[in-house]
Amino acid sequence: PSSVMGGVSDFEKWFGQLEKSRCVPDIKFDSFECGTLRGLAWNAKSFISPLPTSPNTKITTVPKSVVLGAPYKDDDWDSQLALKLWNEIEKGKDSEYYGYCSLLTSGEINTKDASSASDWVPPSTAPNALRHWTESELNVLSSASPRGQRLLRAKESQEKEWKQKYNNEAVSSKMTFSQFEWAMEVVHSRAFKGVGSSSSSSGDGIDISPGPMLMIGALAPVVSAIAAYVYSADHEVSLPVYVALGVLAVGPAFYNLLSGDDDKNNAAAEEAVLLPLIDSANHLEEADSKIEYNPLSGGFELTVGPNCFLPADGSPKNAKYTKDGKKKQSLYQLYISYGRKSDPELLLNYGFLRDVPVTTPDDMSAHRIKLAKAFGDGGGGAS
C-alpha cells in the first residue's frame, strides 16, 4: 500500500519553484490519525513561530496558473474537472501540474508500469468514503438505522449519476470508469466553489453538496478600496489596474477563473476549482479560514485564525499535557472550514465523522463499522 506521505517531496519541490507561490515556512505536511491521514501541520515549538492569534493571518498563495477549474453552472462541471485532472495525470512529469499530480497519486505517478498505464488507477484520496466499503460493512450501516438506509440510497444515486456522466463519449474515450471514479472522488472531496452555490440533492431528503463551500472571490469592497489606495501609494499604477481594483470593489463575491473576453456577459459565473496545497488542509467546521483571489498577487490566498489549529495528538488546545500524561508537544494540525457539512456528506464523499478518530490503523474494516454505528446513533459532526 502507498504511504499517505507519498508524493510530498515532489509537491514541495514543485510548489517552491512556482512563480508567485508563497507558503510560510512553519507549514509542513504530516500524517495524523495513527498515520492514516495526511494533512498540514504547524510547528509552534519556537518563540519565532507561535500559533497565529490574528484572525487574518495569510499563510499561502497559490498561483492562478496551477489552478484547474470548470464552470459550476454547468451540469457536468465535475466530469469536466475530472477529465482535466486526468489529462494532467497522464502527462506525468511533463505536466505543469506534476507536483500536485504526484501528491494526489501518493507518488505512484512515478512508479506505474508503462505497459499497464492504460488501466492504471491511483490510490484513493478518500479511502473510507462510502463507495469503498465492503458489502458487510454497508450492511452494518443499513441495519444501524433508517438514517443509514437513506444514506445508502444516496450512495446509489451518486453512483448512477457518475455512470451517466461517464457515458459521455468525450469522457469515456479518454479513461476507464475506474479512472473516472478516482478523478471524480478527487473533485467531489477537494474542489472549492464560491459561496452561494446551491447544493444538489442525492435523493431521500439527503442534500449532498460536493466540495467545500467557501468564499472564493473578490475581497470585501472596503478592503478592496483600501488595497487600491495602499498599492497605488507604493507602485506606479496603470489605468487597467485601477479599473480592475474598481471592479473588484463593487463586483459580486465570486471569482470567474476561466472566463475571458469571449465570456464578458457571464463575468459573475461561479467556478469550481482545485487549489493545490490549500486542499491538503483537513476540515474543521468552526475553523476561521478564508480563501480569496487577489488580482495583485495573481493567486488564491489562504488566511487563517486561531480556530484553525488543534494539537496534532488530539489533546485539548489549552492542555499542558497530552492524553498519555506526557508534556504537551507543540505540533498542531492546520484545519480549514469547508463550510457546513452534514454527516451524510462527510461519510459519502470524505469517509469520516467528527469525533470518530482512527484507533485501529491495521484494521480499517473495524473503523468503518465504528463509523457506521456512530452514524446510526446520530453521532459525529453536523447532522
Image (spheres, grey):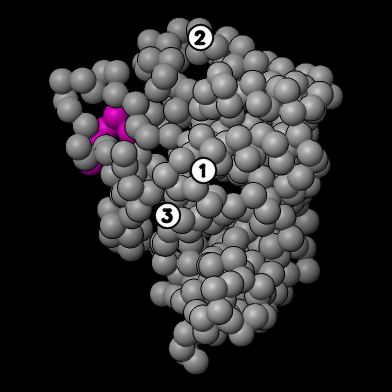
Amino acid at pointer 1: Leu
Q: Distance between the residues labelled 1 and 3?
A: 25 Å
Residue beneath label 1, please?
274
Q: Residues within 10 Å of mark 3 (few under 14, many from 20)?
A: few
Q: Contact (CB < 8 A) between labels 1 and 2?
A: no
Q: Quick one: quadrant of the C terminus?
A: top right
- Magenta residues span 88-94
| Residue 342 in the figure: left or right of residue 138 | right
Front label number (3 vs 2): 3
Amino acid at pointer 3: Gly
Question: Residue 58 is drawn in which quadrant?
Answer: bottom right
Q: How far apart are marks 1 and 2 (CA)?
A: 22 Å
Q: Earlier in the sequence, mark 1 or mark 2?
A: 2
Amino acid at pointer 2: Asn
Q: Distance between the residues labelled 3 and 2?
A: 38 Å
Element under disc 3:
loop
| Residue 359 in the figure: left or right of residue 28 | right
Q: Residue at x 58, y 81 (%)?
A: 321
Q: Quick one: quadrant of the N terminus?
A: top left
Residue beneath label 2, please?
168
Residue 193 visible in this rendered orientation of the protein: no
Element under disc 1:
strand
Position of residue 19 measured from the top left corner of the image (x, y, whole percent): 36, 60
